[in-house]
Amino acid sequence: MTRKAVALISGGLDSLLAARLIQNQGIHVEGINFYTGFCVEGHTHAIRKKDKDKVKRNNALWVAEQLGIKLHIVDIVEEYKDIVINPKHGYGANLNPCLDCKIFMVQKAHEWIKANNFDFIITGEVIGQRPMSQRKKTMPVVSAESGADDLLLRPLCALNLEETKPEKEKWVDRNLLKDFHGRSRKPQMALAKEMGFEDYAQPAGGCCFLTDSSYSVKLQDLWDNRGHKKYEIDDIMLLKVGRHIRPEQGFKLIIAREEGENRFLSGYKNQFQTIKTVSHAGPLALVEGEPLNAEQLKLACAITARFSKGRDEALVSLEYRNPNDDAHQLDVKPLAAKQIPQDWYVA
Amino acid sequence: MKQTVIELDARRLFCPMPVIRLQDSLKQQAAGSRVKIFCTDPGVMNDIPTWCRINGHRLVSSLEEDHEYILVVEKGPDES
């Protein structure tokens, strides 16, 4: 009887190697990848023109193709909100709830194997690789709190851990598993070479926007100004785009930095107040907050004009549009760079 | 007989969301059914063909038109 395992595929090297180690033992492996909304994959280079020459590949799909396995991509955006907002084990250096995230993903994988008649779960975790979620002390926490218990096998560091069911039942040969530990990537790179993998992504923690300090500051600012920690998918997408400038409590400008971002932000014209320079080439700005009063509008236009080609002119014309009202035009003097205090920039 | 093609709007969604929409739509269809998906993330021109190859579906066509990416996929015989 061929045993079946599902591998958590992030798109990085470790999950690639872990899956191949198990495939090499005659196990049928399929991949599972979870989309949280915070995944770095694809997003910013899909928007920004300057990144247009980068390879636009989804590394999880690419890894699955290298392994010759199916990949199931699961949208967990809604369920994941509770992990981000109320992490039982707390945040890491930024707003990254890494341990809760790992527990949640293994829990979802456990539900998946039960629904699809698979036998066990594998991950590319390595003891000591990450400061929060991949420590010897936290590995049993992930197994226990996810409900997967001994159905969770970590092939790259299994020899440093207690035997799991797949090993006890001899579905896999424990002697062919690894004892990797620590932050060094050398053992993984050597194994990749041995397996014939030459091209692979190196995310090692960089696959989630929540590990990014600038992104986390913007998310915290959003929560602080709303007075609660809720968010919608559009909120977290917009935090990835543009300059974020908050001149005062209650309204924030999201100003496009280039053509790709202009096009992206224009997709939100029907949801947000917008400001656009009309006398000169310039950015589109979204206004997040209540409808602006006359003074706020003048300030918002002067800031937006600062980032247009007319920044050194005496006056720049801009169009302000509220989705519920007619557009109207204003002429303002652009602010000078030094007139925009650094603490208005949210980052 | 003209084949019915289901249309999916995945504009303004970033990868992998268009792939997920396509995956979830095809799950509801019989083998041989076709889905036409409209996207704005250029990443789909790489991701959807890759997803089709690994999951046993057929990419019938793909084209770029005025910053939109339009792909037609036919569901393969395997359950995915």
Image (cartoon, helix red, strand yellow):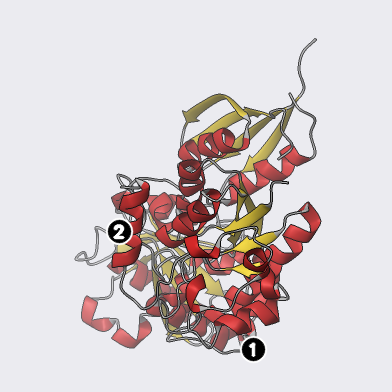
Label placed on residue A288: none
Verify CB contact (< 8 Å) between mark 1 and mark 2: no
Above or below, A299 relative to A108: below
Above or below, A225 relative to B34: below
The residue furthest left is A312
- The residue that disc 2 covers is A190
Asked whether, in this view, residue B78 is left or right of residue A159, the answer is right
Locate residue B29, reporting x and y percent: 79, 34
Could you tell me which residue is drawn at 73 percent across and 23 percent down? B32
Assess disc 1: are there few (<14), some (14-19) or many (≥20) residues with their C-alpha within 10 Å of its C-alpha.
few
The amino acid beneath tag 1 is Lys
As helix, strand or loop, the secondary structure at mark 2 comes to helix
- The residue that disc 1 covers is A88
Locate residue A151, reporting x and y percent: 68, 68
Above or below, A137 relative to A65: below
Locate residue A119, reporting x and y percent: 72, 58
Asked whether, in this view, residue B28 is left or right of residue A244, the answer is right
Q: Nearer the viewer, residue B23 or A304?
A: B23
Residue B49 appears in view: yes
